[in-house]
Amino acid sequence: MELSDLGERKLIERLLCFVDDSYSSSSSGEDAVAVQLGEVTLVFSSDMLVARTDVPPGMTWRQVGWKVVAMNLSDLAAKGAEPIGGLYAFGLPKWFKVDDALEIASGIREASNIYGARYFGGDVNESGEVVVSGAVLGVTERFIPRSGAKLGDVVTVTGPFGLTAAGLKILLEGLEAGSGRDRCLKSVYQPEPRIREGVVLAKEGYASSCIDSSDGLAVSLHELAKASNVGFAIDNVPIPPEVLLFAQKNGLDPYELAFYGGEEYELVVTMPEVKWGDAAKAVEKVGGSLHKIGRVIQEKEVKFKHPEEGWVKISCRGYEHFTRQ
């Protein structure tokens, strides 16, 4: 069997049987792992950027460095961890320009500084294409799992959806952008991990479960539902006006862009409804926003109340490595 026959998620399921979780306070399947060290909870995560799949046209090497930090810190944010720092290993072709390698490092340092992490260094090796792999460390007072969603909880998100999907269609398919082009492209070139939001949601005990939306809102909802053994009824997805205009211009469904776009690094969070108001205020105090989009249901499905089609099932569809795209 080849990896293309199995797919990324099935491969991960098989790899997990080799993982030593004897010192871990988190369940398998998380994007980050918590290890209790005395009274301190350390949170580790690792993510890899590969130029062929993760670098769209027009992205500078400095932005590549920024993105690999965002990818890694977003997983810490979803667990409520405050970043300490990270190591970043470079795989570079021998023909790669020295100045471009330094630009990647510059982008890593810039993003790390902005989000309160330190750039500790890493490794450099020769490879057939540009690969940058990060390993980051954070601390938290309360690790937020994927598996804590319960009946009576509401589903919330830290930002709107669809901007990155629109931006990628502009870059990869040449679709007409309109006046929202700059905002859509910025979401592609300079994603923002929701570190401050994740930390406050954990510290104040608001969140019952959390995941970041880098694989797409639909996949993220399905992963949370599976881990918590529940379902979700979604009735309000925040979509920016730029995405609505883009969809109208190009004959697209904006909700298709919002659910299946991916790489937006927002947090998808469940919490008891009684905590919703206080949580929204706490997130606002740290410069973020929190939007209620639905509720936890007993049925093991993810469904959405489409404004024109009524209740429809949301499939677990998004980008997956190794599959034949």
Image: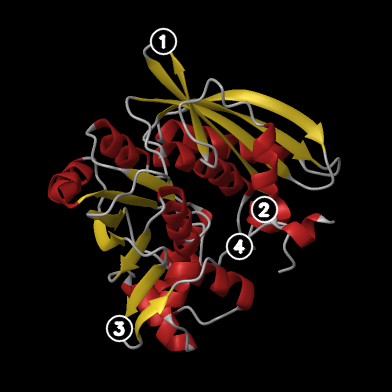
Nearer the observer: mark 1 or 4; the answer is 1
* Circle 3 SS class: loop
Asked whether 185 or 282 is in front, the reply is: 282
Of the residues shown, which amino acid type is indicated by label 4?
Tyr
Of the residues shown, which amino acid type is indicated by label 3?
Pro
Nearer the observer: mark 4 or 2; the answer is 2
| Mark 4 burial class by Cα count in 10 Å: few <14, some 14-19, many 20+ | some
Estimate the spatial distance between the alpha carbons at disc 4 and disc 2, rounded to whole Å: 14 Å
Residue position marked by numbered label 4 in the rendering: 319
Q: Which mark is residue 7?
A: none
Residue at 32% from the left image edge and 67% from the top image edge:
233
Assess whether mark 4 and mark 1 are in contact (beta carbons under 8 angstroms).
no
The quadrant in which residue 169 appears is: bottom right
* Circle 4 SS class: loop
Instruction: Please report whichever mark, 4 or 2, sits nearer to the chain's N-terminal start.
Output: 2
The image position of residue 162, as x and y in percent, is: 43, 68
Residue position marked by numbered label 1 in the rendering: 38
Q: Is residue 5 left or right of residue 250?
A: right
* Circle 2 SS class: helix
Estimate the spatial distance between the alpha carbons at disc 1 and disc 3, rounded to whole Å: 51 Å
Instruction: Please report whichever mark, 1 or 3, sits nearer to the chain's N-terminal start.
Output: 1
Instruction: Please report whichever mark, 1 or 4, sits nearer to the chain's N-terminal start.
Output: 1
Q: Is residue 325 left or right of residue 213?
A: right
The image position of residue 59, as x and y in percent, is: 60, 56
Total numbered circles: 4
Nearer the observer: mark 2 or 3; the answer is 2
Residue position marked by numbered label 2 in the rendering: 10
Q: Quadrant of the C terminus?
A: bottom right
